[in-house]
Amino acid sequence: MSLVTTILGRLIKAVITLLAIAVLNFFLIHAAPGDPAAVLAGEAGAADPLFIAQLRERFGLDQPLYVQLWSYVKNVLTLDLGYSFRQGMPVYDLIADRLPATLLLTLSAFIISLTLGIAFGVAAAARVGKVSDSFLTTLALLFYATPLYWAALMAVLVFSVQLGWLPGFGYETVGSGYTGLARAWDILQHLILPALTLGLFFMAVYMRMTRASMLEVSQMDFVKTARAKGLSEHIIRRRHILRNALLPVVTLAGLQAGQLIGGAVLTETVFAWPGIGRLMFESLEARDYNTILGVFLVSAAMVILFNILTDIVYRLVDPRIGAKT
Amino acid sequence: MTFWKRFATNRGAVIGLIILIAVIIIAVLAPVIYPGGPWKMVQRPFLVPFTTEGLPLGTDTLGRNVAAGLVHGARVSLLVGLVSTVMALLIGVPLGALAGFYGGYVDEGAMRFTEFFQTIPNFALAIVLVAILQPTLGSITLAIAIVSWPPVARLVRAEVMSLKRREFVEAAHLAGLSNTRILVSEVLPNAVSPIIVMASLMVATAILLESSLSFLGLGDPNIMSWGYMIGAARTVIRSAWWLSFFPGVAILITVLALNLIGEGLNDAFNPHLKKGRT
């Protein structure tokens, strides 16, 4: 199968998955306690029965369920995610407004966790059984058990409140009027703590995986052959072991992307990072179901897109996969 | 070597087990240790830890005893962790077993269904479910179970697929046993050990998930939990660090203990794997 047909297949599957999530969303709205119209209106409109009656008519809530389902799915397909009465804006606009900040945060966290995780995993595997290996594995074990949001709060406490090194709040300095490079530098400083704390847990996951995978591959026959040929340990590790050991790590990283976006809800809440995770948190407090479900749908779409991207990377790293299927 | 001896050779696992037993005892004895419950206001707010007798960890924003909150919070964490894991097993094990055993369309259907749930970002789904169903102990447990079963189904499916080709299963077929009987009494008992290892790690993840939901304000409003304590103290982190610090340590220690136990169980079940484990 060529790369193009594979991507096409994945895209079709992605659309089906998104449709299924849209259907799930529809039934969730109807599962929410109370009148769906009141739910759609949020608490703001709930007091006025006339308003709710109008809403019911406007959203076709007086129609049979399957008609409603069809129109809901049709709306989602045309990127109409409903209206947030709380914020007085279409949900799509709200999300589009906040999405870049989340993308910046999650991608930075992903890159940090993957590079550090692989680097530490390789380092630990190279010193297996020694003190530095136990130190790194213990550290990974700790990070693996640390609640994301708590790590974020503690980082704010230490690096922002106590030491005053980095800002612990927001996306950029409000009212600073920075432009160009100065603004980028400002945002970068604000990005460091959220991206690091979001990446911490995943770094631990990737490190454990890399270490195990490196140790497993190093037992294989072709490594013994390379050693018998008299290649240096350094070259064996980089060219023979690492390249093969990375494959399961990349697969896992792709699968973990969903968790990363879920974790962003927590990180963005702690750091007041203006992304879709923070939007979800604010909507929770307001019981703004339209926005909650919209963010849910968009985050699922992000995960699917990310999985397709990892799939492509995977094929580029390992040409055998394309050849086999 | 017996199973327990093998488990005991892993020092981390033994430490984990001791910690977990201690946490369980504290959770069970919570009403005895702090009979007043976690919500009672006992002193003036914002008392710094280690300064007042009887209030070792200080008081919170409303003058409630932080130590009492921690002790009572242990109950929710353990309960939700355990029950949601059992529920996830009840969904994942039958689904994976049927898929692996019957193959074909059953397998195809079950795996598409599982894949769908694996694609959805699971913390986001848990948030949506709890928000829609309203936060109660039941809805939180259910939501965690719904987002945690897919890996179980995949694991059980893989185990069953490899077991069903073994000779003892063929012998059972020849002996005229029904499919159900073979699956339940011949195949599944042999897949128990990897399921137990996974379950112990799932309890840890479930505790993290529960605390994250409570942190966001999606906890049962009538029950004190560690995540809620951190969430409520989030805004006063600059002035009262201990309010978020201690509950976080409690979560960290409990989750760490469960992870260590999981690793120990894995080693004990697979003695041949020994070193080089993850």
Image (cartoon, coloured by chain):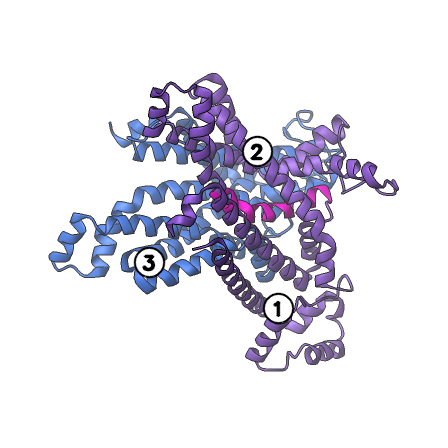
Residue neighbourhood size for the residue with mark 1, other residues' Cα within 10 Å, grouped as few (<14), some (14–19), many (≥20): some
Question: In the picture shown, does residue A231 fall above or below A18?
Answer: above
Residue on which the image places disc 3? B99
Secondary element at image label 2:
helix
> x and y percent of residue B132 in the render?
59, 62
Residue on which the image places disc 1? A77
Q: CA distance from mark 3 to mark 1?
A: 32 Å
The chain coloured purple is A
Give the residue type at disc 3.
Ala
Do badges 3 and 2 share one subunit?
A: no
In magenta, the rendered stretch is A251-272
Q: CA distance from mark 2 to mark 1?
A: 36 Å
Residue neighbourhood size for the residue with mark 2, other residues' Cα within 10 Å, grouped as few (<14), some (14–19), many (≥20): some
Residue on which the image places disc 2? A115
Colour displayed for chain B in the image of the structure: blue
> x and y percent of residue B53 in the render?
65, 26
Q: Which residue occupies the foreground of this view, A107 or B81? A: A107
